[in-house]
Amino acid sequence: MNSVSVDYAGIASGMNNAVSRTAGLLAIALLSVVAVAVFNQQLDQRLAPLELSDPILAQIDAERAQMAGAVLPDTGNTPQQQALQLAIHEAFISSFRLIMIIAALLAFASAISAALLIESTSLPQTGKSHIPAPDI
């Protein structure tokens, strides 16, 4: 905002706000795509050794969009049911963990770029203190 004249401060503020909101929306959209892709890949890896029947796999596929909130089909086998629940939860945790790592790296990159690109402004040195001395 300091790089534009006072006459253009309103326009600069509006542009800054629009770019910021658009970047937030794009980040959410892109990170959501990554989260779903990682969840599906991890879930497929974890379901493969469970040897589930085709109807149960079809029910799971119908619930994939719910991710950790998926309603589990009744397999009629308690250990298999527990393994299925664990597979879904671990797949979700894997996707969530990756998104948090990406978000942390982006925040760190933002802090680094701000530190390098934003010029510091200092008060002019007048030789006088800006805080008046108390009257005694």
Image (cartoon, grey):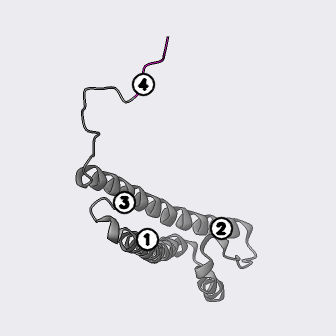
Q: Residue sitting at 55 percent across and 67 percent down?
A: 92
Q: Earlier in the sequence, mark 2 or mark 4?
A: 2
Alpha carbon of mark 3 to alpha carbon of mark 2: how far? 32 Å
Alpha carbon of mark 2 to alpha carbon of mark 4: how far? 68 Å
Alpha carbon of mark 4 to alpha carbon of mark 3: how far? 44 Å
Query: Magenta stretch containing residue 133, yes or no?
Result: yes
Q: Which residue is mark 3?
A: 106
Q: Which residue is mark 1?
A: 17
What span is colored magenta in the figure?
131-136
Task: From the viewer's side, name the closer residue of 100 and 37.
Answer: 100
Task: From the viewer's side, name the closer residue of 30 and 16.
Answer: 16
Image spot of residue 104 (x, y percent) = 41, 55
Q: Secondary structure at mark 1?
A: helix
Q: Which mark is residue 132?
A: 4
Task: From the viewer's side, name the closer residue of 8 and 92.
Answer: 8
Q: In which quadrant of the rendered image does the N terminus lie?
A: bottom left
Q: Earlier in the sequence, mark 4 or mark 3?
A: 3
Q: Quadrant of residue 77?
A: bottom right
